[in-house]
Amino acid sequence: MRKYHAPALSLAIARHGQMVCQQAFGLADQSAGEPATSASLFRIASLTKPITSAAIFSLLEQGRLGLHDFIFGAEGRLKFDYGDRYPELVSRITLYHLLTHTCGGWENDGNDPMFSNPGMHHRELITWALQHQPLKHAPGTHYAYSNFGYCILGRVIEKITGQTYVEHVRQGVLAKCGIRGMKLAGNTLAQRAAGEVVYYGQVGSGTEPYGMNVTRMDSHGGWIATPSDLVQFAMHVDGFKFTPSILGAESLKTMTTPSPANSSYACGWCVNRIPNWWHSGSLPGTLTIMVRTASGLCWAAFVNTRCEGLNLDDLMWKVVKAVPAWHA
């Protein structure tokens, strides 16, 4: 924390369905001298994606969606909600393409739609992007990490359920995991939630934590939570018998099987052959990690800054391996 000027670090670790460590270090608010606690809320950034994926797979299990359903156009789940007509490639995007970041474009780069036009709401932004940011590849042929794709998944959830994304995820995913305190992030310091940390920018790593429309990132990066919330979620989708799963075995297998376009990414989860599953998150002022290991561990760690060289994944592997009895 001293090396990377991290004001606060919070972590939680569970093994075989039991929480074995919850700890926080440093300051949630430097100017007020407010200490971070294990109950401090942080922006979780892209740890939102596995949660959105779980919500989609729950709807798949209910028969309300099909994995290869089209999204846009006459046969699509969103029909013509975002334009009278769509580019031909857009009409070929399926639910699976969005889940696996293989829709063909809208990459998390300098042209990421989610960081442009901050005054637009979801409908306006999606309508604009479909017409003004053409796909670079045929859907299904190329992996490109896409926040915008997961924004669209949020709108699919809303269309199918008739609820807001937040309402549905609270009821359909979080409540089933015993999670009560998660909420959508605000954009400004004045919108800081009770118990939420303050975020600190660093030069070269996105200096303005309060200069984004984070609320609009709902389904790809918009939640605030504690590390124990994310561990609780991970334990309910980890595929082990220690904690009741909110998804069936077939859904979990499909959700964590990589796509043909990228052997390291499945549906909202990074994966490897061990098999470990994980996801990281990053925004100006925020770094997060969530991991589920094949050895029966789940953990999450958050800091309220972001800078070059700060690697929470490496840090947490050192932490868990320091306890031989956990067999990490």
Image: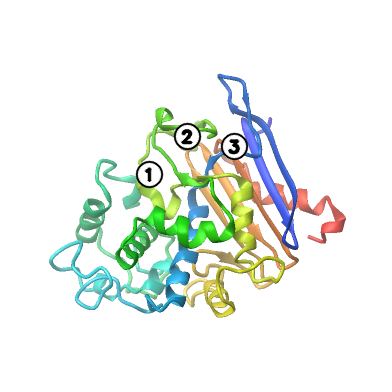
One can see residue 108 in this view:
no
Q: Nearer the viewer, residue 28 or 204?
A: 28
Residue 64 occupies quadrant: bottom left
Residue 107 in percent (x, y) is at 38, 58
Q: How far, Cα to Cα, is label 2 from label 3?
A: 10 Å
Reading the image, the residue beneath label 2 is: 193
Mark 1: which secondary structure?
helix
Q: Nearer the viewer, mark 1 or mark 2?
A: 2
Q: Amino acid at mark 3?
A: Ser
Q: Nearer the viewer, mark 1 or mark 3?
A: 3
From the viewer's perspective, is 20 left or right of 89? right
Of labels 2 and 3, earlier in sequence is 3
Find residue 287 and name its label.
none
Is the residue marked by circle 2 packed among few (<14), some (14-19), or many (20+) residues within 10 Å?
A: some
Give the residue drawn at x 32%, y 74%: 138
Q: Amino acid at mark 2?
A: Ala
From the viewer's perspective, is 99 left or right of 78? right
Reading the image, the residue beneath label 1 is: 215
Residues marked 1 and 3 touching at CB (< 8 Å): no
Residues marked 1 and 2 touching at CB (< 8 Å): no
Find residue 40 and name its label.
3
Residue 219 in percent (x, y) is at 41, 55
One can see residue 89 in this view:
yes
Give the residue drawn at x 59%, y 55%: 178
Q: How far, Cα to Cα, is label 1 from label 2?
A: 12 Å
Residue 217 in percent (x, y) is at 38, 49
Q: Amino acid at mark 1?
A: Thr
Of labels 1 and 2, earlier in sequence is 2
